[in-house]
Amino acid sequence: MVLQKMRAGAQGVFAKVLVGLIVIVLAVTGFGAIQFFSGGEPIAASVNGDDITQRAFELETTRHRALQRSQLGGDVSEELLDRLVDRRVVLESLIVNTLVEQFAGELDLSVSDRAVLARIRESFAGVEGFDEAMYRNWLAGLGHTPSSYQAEQADRLIQAQVSASLGETGFVTKRELSRSARILSQRRDVAYLLFDIAAFASEVDIAEEEIETHYGNFLDDYMTQEKFDFDYVRLLRAPVEAEVVIEEQAIEAAYQNEIAAMPEPRRHAAHILLAVNDERSVADATAALLKVRSDIERGASFEERAREISEDPSAEDGGDLDFLGRDVLPMALEDTLWELSPGELSAPVVTEYGVHLAKLIAVEDVEIPTLDERRDDIVAGLRREQGALRFGELVREVDELAFEDGDTLEGLSERFGVAIESAQGVTRSSTDGI
């Protein structure tokens, strides 16, 4: 019965108009119309008409937690992160950032891509320049892509411009200006008299009772430290090491271990990165890099193309990544580089950061020293190791003899051939005399 009434009602003019409106909205906006009828994405806060979505709020909270986890290191409990990351503080920071962005928009402030990349390179500078591994690990830990991180850094640079423009701009209130004018126009006469304490010292008489009272009240200040006189023997490691005999077989084995432990030759590489996002698919990025590869093979400069289109901080240096060892780059890109010959270009390589076009510039020359070149250092190292073991055995023997004959040092002196030495007047805070 109910279904019949609904079917009958659907034939009315109002129902047909409503259905028509829904069809038009769906045709124009697609699936976004669902949000049109359901009220849209949840809003965490609205700042002068600019909405901070719940999704953006949750993502920022997740990044704050990831930052705390990376700073603390190791396993961090969720309970601890809940205490360290206050969701209200995160939301307030988003509100402040939105206000700053709005103000920056009014001032028409902006930053160049070059400035953003320079900031990133400075933040992740290693001993030998930009540290690609540090940068990639940081992005992974915070859930960023290169594009999203560069956008965030651009916002922060703009925020810094706003803060600087406000902080470095001098201004005074009318009240401050009036008060300053009154003070600057004042004139004052000042008189002063100097007293020399030494001039009055001869007029002061101190009774013996006062001296005794003061001494009694501050007795600890006049107490000297206890002093010790004692005899001792010294067992030195250097003579023990000098007596160690190093066999040729041990030297050869240590040399082979050194050679085996030498790192694999590093690769000097460069790359061009195109990020994959809503506006560019993997296929689009791959096709674009194939064209770039073709242009370079026909004579175009790899470095210039990297500066023009690469979306990696290394773009400023023509895509140069300097010398890299294993376990620095994404696995797919690393494996590709290790298969290339110097000067060779790779095919487009897909990683979690986007699509790369890589170039191997050079392979590091690794010089393997000869045994004769390493002999002195190896012998010295083996002598230290074996001498330390022998010295440890002697120390244990000293402990045993000292325990058995604790009243005299004669036995230790005779056993180890060392002289008995003396020290006098040694205090707790000084080792003078030893």
Image (tube, helix red, strand yellow):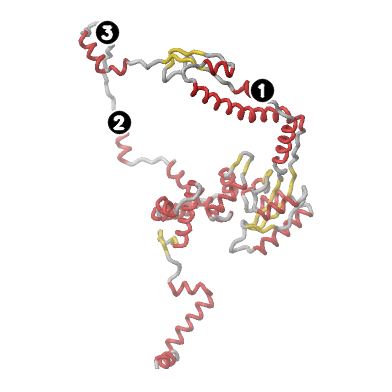
What kind of residue is marked 1?
A: Glu
Decide: marks 3, 1 in contact (CB < 8 A)? Answer: no
* Mark carried by residue 199: 3
Any part of residue 251 in sight: yes
Q: Quadrant of the N terminus?
A: bottom left
Q: Nearer the viewer, residue 42 or 127?
A: 127
- Nearest the viewer among 353 and 190 is 353
Q: Amino acid at mark 3?
A: Ala
Q: Residue at position x 48%, y 46% from top?
A: 72
2 vs 3, front mark: 3
The image shows a total of numbered marks equal to 3
Image spot of residue 152 (x, y percent): 52, 53
Which label is found at residue 183?
Answer: 2
Measure the C-alpha gap from mark 1 to mark 2.
Answer: 84 Å
Image quadrant assignment for residue 276: bottom right
Between the C-alphas of marks 3 and 1, the distance is 72 Å
Q: Nearer the viewer, mark 3 or mark 1?
A: 1
Q: Secondary structure at mark 2?
A: helix
**Amino acid type, mark 2:** Ile
> Which residue does the numbered mark 1 point to in the structure image?
243
Q: Residues within 10 Å of mark 2 (few under 14, many from 20)?
A: few
Crowd tier of the residue under label 3, counting other residues whose Cα lies within 10 Å: few below 14, some 14–19, many 20 or above: few
Of label 2 and label 3, which has the lower sequence position? 2
Give the SS element for disc 3.
Answer: helix
Q: Is residue 231 left or right of residue 305?
A: left
> Which label sits in the foreground, 1 or 2?
1
Residue 122 falls in image quadrant: top right
Report how far apart the C-alphas of labels 2 and 3 lie in the structure: 39 Å
Q: Residue at x 62, y 57 (%)?
A: 352
